[in-house]
Amino acid sequence: MTIPVHWYRHDMGGAPVLRGVAGDLIALLDACLVNGFNLRTATSVVVSGEVATVTFSSAFGWLQHQVIEVAGSTPAALNGEKRVSTVVGNSITFPAPGVANGTATGTITCRTPGLGWQKAFASGNVAVYRAQDISGTRMYLRVDDTGAGAANYARVRGFETMSDINTGTGPFPTDAQVSGGLFWAKSTTVDTTTRSWALVGDPVCFYATMRATASAASNEWAFGDFNSFMTADAFRAFICGSPDTLFNASQTRGIISGNSTANTVYAPRSSSQLGGSVACAATDAPLAVEFPNLPNNGLVLRPRLWFETGTSSRLRATMRGMLVSLHGQNTNNVFALGQVLSSADGYAGLGFCLDSGAQNAPQLGAVFDLVGPW
């Protein structure tokens, strides 16, 4: 069994660190997209009333609602991806429907799994990532984390095809749009101080934010497919990042925060399916609705829409899994980076916050559906 949407946070057990150091972003993407992390061996797994309790010999660092992968168990129904229901001491629980009461046998391991992407090409601190799910466009993400320029950021670009780590067709953005590609910040400065980060994604798309300091604005990374309004959109992919190194600006720029501009989000081609890279932008800034909203005493969300820049009356897509707040600054000091919500405005299940404000006064930028599929 697989769970379609996974989330990751800097304070999870075994999570990769993010600093202003060359290679840190590659290590983070390897862990979250491909390899997973935090492999542990259980001391016991006991099922009672269709709930499995997994106990470990020491603290493990998993968080409530995150996805883990279980292997090596008999009965086999306990294996696979599971969502953690509770965390108490050195034990976790997860649902075990249809599994009889009893103690499982075998050398049973648990880990935080990756999103199921592949590392198509790699050379040192340069890597190319690609979704494996054939339902998506499977376009390529090239990440240069060598520190050329400065070690506190990486340069990123999407490609329609690639034959090796340096050769590709259909780049987005092109050099004419952003010379050298977009910037993904790891820090505002070159240093070894660890940064807060959070990432959420599915087999064909992921979104992330990074915070350099408690008072700094978030910096956004995203890559993958969007949900196109076209019935056959072969170029329904996008990349989001910064066009420059102004990482500590008062307002972030991207699709998560809702402050996207013409040079932060790119798709490989327009809705005509012709030509090359096209700039895109979000359409729906917060409306300053009171929080909580009095009629439902809750949080009001809606899907994020975006259009091709220059054609603001032509909506291209909604962002996969993304629900945006209508409350704007009214949510300051309410939500934290990577906070998990139980429900909001009729959207059943769990939501995951990626906010766009400072860590000490977060404005809710987006909530991502953790149940899926997107």
Image (spheres, rainbow, N blue to C red):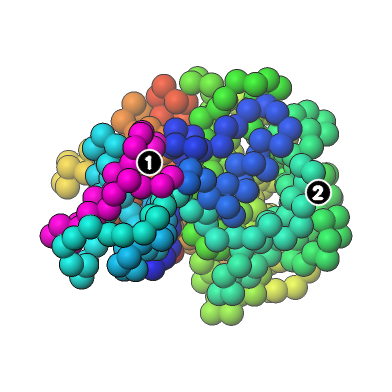
One can see residue 363 in this view: no
In depth, the one of 97 and 231 nearer the eye is 97
The N terminus lies in which quarter of the figure? bottom left
Where is residue 11? Give x, y as percent. Answer: 44, 33
Dot 1 amino acid type:
Trp
In depth, the one of 327 and 8 nearer the eye is 8
| Image: 140 above or below 123 | below
The C terminus lies in which quarter of the figure? bottom left
Which residue occupies 34% across, 68% down? 76
Where is residue 192? Give x, y as percent. Answer: 65, 21
Indicate yes or no whether the magenta region holds residue 245.
Answer: no
Which residue occupies 65% across, 53% down? 239
Q: Residues within 10 Å of mark 2 (few under 14, many from 20)?
A: few
Given the current orientation, which residue lies at the most extreme right position?
167
Dot 2 amino acid type:
Ser
Given the current orientation, which residue lies at the most extreme bottom position?
232
Which residue occupies 74% across, 50% down? 127
Q: CA distance from mark 1 to mark 2?
A: 32 Å
Magenta residues, start to end: 40-62
In depth, the one of 7 and 368 nearer the eye is 7
In depth, the one of 256 and 192 nearer the eye is 192
Q: In terms of sequence position, does the residue under pointer 1 or pointer 2 come before the other? A: 1
Side of 118 where 163 appears, left or right: right
Label at residue 48: none
| Image: 273 above or below 48 | below
Residue at label 2?
Answer: 123
Where is residue 124? Give x, y as percent. Answer: 79, 44
Q: Quadrant of residue 216?
A: top right
Residue at label 1?
Answer: 62
